[in-house]
Image (tube, helix red, strand yellow):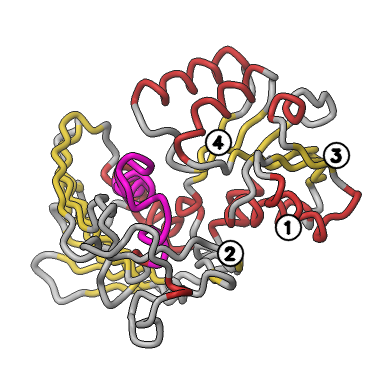
């Protein structure tokens, strides 16, 4: 089996993680990385040395004839331009979620992909997580009868750490965390309910983060660093998929913070099913909770970062209860990351 020669575009925490994983993968050959920030390239170079090439210029990076695939892990607002250019150069693309920040930009990506005739895979790695793979299998068994309702909840205890210390805390940059964070779980809800959304209503608010602190205030200089529950180690921040990164450490209570820290979504599907999604970034726990209801029973499922997965079925007119505890085979996102990476190569 030949190796897939690929490059990584965007070397933040997620991009560097993909670079490290594919560099170690027996079916892949990492040939190049690209980032417009020379300092970022300098930080990752010790890990790969002269075995790969480094680019600040995206055009030169994508013009390599010996690189057939790219992983796009750039900031969300750059996805449209990066993906369209990559497809224009005939590359296969693994595009991190969300695809883009508007319907128009997403349509542009799809048109470029169709014109290129290459592979497009979106980085929804939770679809490959052991828990949700088992959920999909159980759906096919029809134990709940005809599904009608689904509820999904993102409890994000680390929301402040992940989103409110950096530029993602502003709508001008992130637009909404329903896309940056919520798209994972909403995509799963769409899968489980088996329909195309036809009507969506969403609302939310900024209930905890934000405030009157200066926009340039940082954790490293704060006189309340030892007592503030939102203090973050900017030099050694551990992501939930195992990558340690440097990250901005702006105060989460700064005046410029305007991205909603809680949101609620109602979805109507073409098949008559209905879904509810809620997201909160200041909960005590970090979990995804699902409830699916059919005419024969109800299924609850729990995902947490410790991979203590549980699926529980209850049935109407009986005391019967079934439980399953899927096990992750290892890797970030409950085993979803390595399986997603392998699926792209395949």
What residue does disc 3 label? 2
Start-end of magenta stretch: 161-189
Count of numbered tags: 4
User: Where residue 226 sits: x, y (%)?
Assistant: 40, 87
Residue 299 seen in the figure: no
User: Magenta part mainly helix, strand or loop?
Assistant: helix
Query: Does label 4 or label 2 sit earlier along the sequence?
Result: 4
What residue does disc 4 label? 121
Question: Could you say which is closer to the camera, residue 22 or residue 54?
Answer: 54
Q: CA distance from mark 4 to mark 2?
A: 28 Å
Q: Is residue 197 above or below residue 338?
A: above
SS state under label 4: strand
SS state under label 3: loop
Disc nearest the viewer among 2 and 3: 2
Q: Are marks 2 and 1 in contact (CB under 8 Å)?
A: yes
* Residue 43, numbered circle: 1
The residue furthest top is 115
What residue does disc 2 label? 246
Q: Residues within 10 Å of mark 4 (few under 14, many from 20)?
A: some
Residue 257 seen in the figure: yes
SS state under label 2: loop
Q: CA distance from mark 2 to mark 1?
A: 10 Å
User: Where residue 187 sits: x, y (%)?
Assistant: 35, 44
Q: CA distance from mark 4 to mark 3?
A: 20 Å
């Amino acid at each position: 089996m030949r190796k897939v020669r690929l490059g990584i575009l965007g070397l933040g925490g997620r991009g560097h993680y993909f670079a490290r994983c594919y560099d170690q993968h027996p079916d892949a050959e990492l040939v190049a990385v690209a980032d417009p920030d020379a300092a970022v390239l300098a930080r990752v170079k010790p890990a790969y040395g002269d075995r790969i090439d480094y680019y600040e210029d995206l055009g030169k990076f994508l013009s390599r004839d010996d690189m057939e695939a790219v992983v796009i892990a750039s900031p969300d607002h750059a996805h449209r331009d990066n993906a369209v250019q990559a497809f224009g150069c005939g590359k296969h693309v693994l595009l991190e979620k969300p695809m883009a920040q508007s319907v128009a930009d997403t349509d542009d990506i799809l048109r470029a992909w169709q014109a290129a005739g290459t592979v497009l895979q979106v980085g929804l790695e939770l679809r490959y997580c052991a828990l949700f793979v088992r959920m999909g299998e159980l759906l096919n068994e029809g134990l709940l009868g005809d599904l009608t309702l689904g509820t999904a909840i993102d409890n994000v205890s680390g929301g402040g750490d992940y989103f409110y210390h950096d530029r993602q805390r502003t709508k001008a940059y992130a637009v909404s965390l329903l896309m940056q964070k919520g798209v994972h779980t909403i995509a799963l809800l769409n899968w489980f309910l088996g329909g195309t959304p036809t009507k969506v209503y969403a609302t939310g608010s900024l209930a905890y983060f934000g405030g009157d602190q200066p926009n340039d205030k940082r954790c490293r200089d704060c006189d309340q660093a030892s007592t503030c529950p939102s203090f973050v180690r900017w030099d050694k921040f551990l992501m939930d998929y195992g990558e340690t990164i440097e990250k901005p450490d702006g105060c989460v209570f700064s005046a410029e913070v305007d991205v909603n820290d809680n949101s609620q979504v109602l979805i109507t599907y073409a098949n008559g099913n209905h879904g509810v999604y809620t997201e909160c970034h200041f909960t005590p726990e970090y979990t995804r909770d699902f409830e699916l209801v059919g005419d024969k029973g109800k299924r609850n499922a729990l995902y947490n970062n410790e991979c203590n997965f549980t699926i529980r079925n209850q049935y109407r007119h009986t005391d019967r209860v079934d439980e399953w505890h899927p096990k992750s085979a290892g890797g970030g996102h409950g085993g979803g990351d390595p399986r997603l990476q392998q699926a792209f190569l395949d």
